[in-house]
Amino acid sequence: MIKKLFITLFILVSFCVTSQEDTDNLRLYDNFEPIDQENIFKTEGYYNWGSSIIKGKDGKYHLFYSRWKKSYGFHGWLTHSEIAHATSKKPVGPWKYKETVLKGRRNDHWDAITAHNPKIKYFDGKYYLYYIATNPGDQILSEKDLIETAKEGYPSKNWMPLRNRQRTGVAVSNSLNGPWIRSDKPLIEPSESINTLTVNPAIDRGKDGKYYLILKGDKDKTKWWVRNQAVAISDFPDKDFVMQKKPVIDYLDTEDMSIWYDQKRERFYGVFHTNKGGGFIGMVTSYDGINWKKSNEFVLMPKKIPMADGSIFKPNRLERPFIFYEDGKPKVLSVAIKNGNESYSVFIPIKENKYPVPNKRQLAWQEAELGVVFHYDLHVFDGEKYGQGGNRIDPVADYQIFNPKSLDTDQWVKAAKDAGAKFAILTATHETGFALYQSEVNPYSLKSVKWRNGKGDIVADFVASCRKYGIKPGIYLGIRWNSF
């Protein structure tokens, strides 16, 4: 009997461990460490932008990044960017410039103008340097024209034609030191869920041996830049990519994807940046490289960087996220910073915990110790006995009975504070479905009652009271057990 029980337990434990390996349990939010000057890479007289890291056979870390002279202005990225190579003994820096590896080839090449936003990868004994570029098309643009375009920026008559002809290509080498052999044409043209351009490549090989290339383009039928992420698949790292119909991200204006295949979890991950919601670095995930969804940690970090001296740095722009993996573990998050007239790369160390530890949110919950919950619904006023089953099917006939003449959320919250509570929760909709806030879509709400002339908002009052007394507010929404 004991032997049978042991075998059963062993099978169950083995199953749980195996099943957990391929789940989305990657947690990074609490593991970004503060930075110091060693983690900042600037180049005198240049704007630096974006980065991609790889470890070489020499044991050093190699950084490929964009840069262009400050004399052209920040918008010179479209006309004069070049891809440079730097090295370091550590993936967080300090970095030392080594050489410039790619520039615009001029003449009638697809990459005649600029070389920008690189990603470096190693597949089957060769190095692949993916990058974006543009060309003048049927126009003849002199160096003077390009400089004027860079300095004028978006209003320039040349800006949109150059911007819309941007494409992604690849240069291949047997060594990180080159020489780099460039593709004769772009890897792929816009189609399916993106149009106008194909830029900012992110690529990795999946479990099936195929190559998954994510590109940014414009969303269909948009008058201005509404950006979309799409995926193309090939059996080769440098040709024959086929764009997929289903977009990677089309529910949020995002850009600058960087992806990797996590061997342990058997799934892809991708990081991006967006300016929506105050701006943040986000993460998505996919089992098959085609069907992507928000990861369990969708918001990785706001666009703020903790500094070693305890301060918080909030730059004008924070973009181009890239996560460097080594030995199957995330080691560094690099981002591009624009602040004032400076543009540079920052390398944020990712802490590795040898043993499971509680994250900041779990600690905050544990340390809260005591909280209170306020239930407030229509049955406070009609004298009816509370009945869960009836609430689901029988709406309160006359919700004008809601008339709390002496309601005082300050008194509620102060009582909770005096009792030692550190948080308070209000049931904004309880089981009748009646909403204690103003709603444009729910007629069963305070907007529809005579109390306070239909302008009452208990949720707003409650949150204001919580902030007044230093208690964290929580909102409970009943969405199942209600007649609405």
Image (spheres, helix red, strand yellow):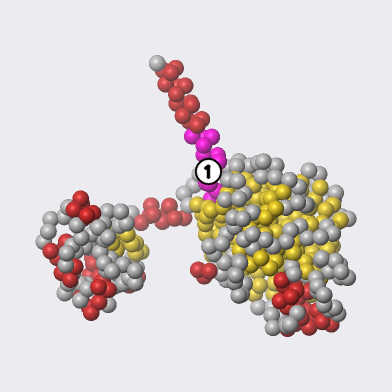
Q: Is residue 86 visible?
A: no
Picture coordinates of residue 431 (x, y %)? 24, 57
Image point (82%, 75%), residue name: 138
Identify which residue is drawn at 47% across, 21% down.
7
Residue 269 inside the magenta-drawn segment: no
In the picture, measured across the screen, residue 186 lies left or right of residue 279, that is right
Which of the 4 quarters of the picture holds residue 444? bottom left
Q: Which residue is mark 1?
A: 23
Quadrant into which the C terminus falls: bottom left
Give the vertical position of 30 relative to 346 (above or below).
above
Magenta residue span: 16-27
Compared to residue 277, the image places residue 119 above or below, namely above
Q: Residue at x 83, y 53 (%)?
A: 172
Q: In the figure, is residue 226 to the left or right of 235?
A: left
Task: Indicate the quadrant where residue 373 lies.
Answer: bottom left
Instruction: Check the image and name the residue furthest to the left.
Output: 383
Q: Amino acid at mark 1?
A: Thr
Q: Nearer the viewer, residue 417 or 397?
A: 397
Q: Secondary structure at mark 1?
A: loop
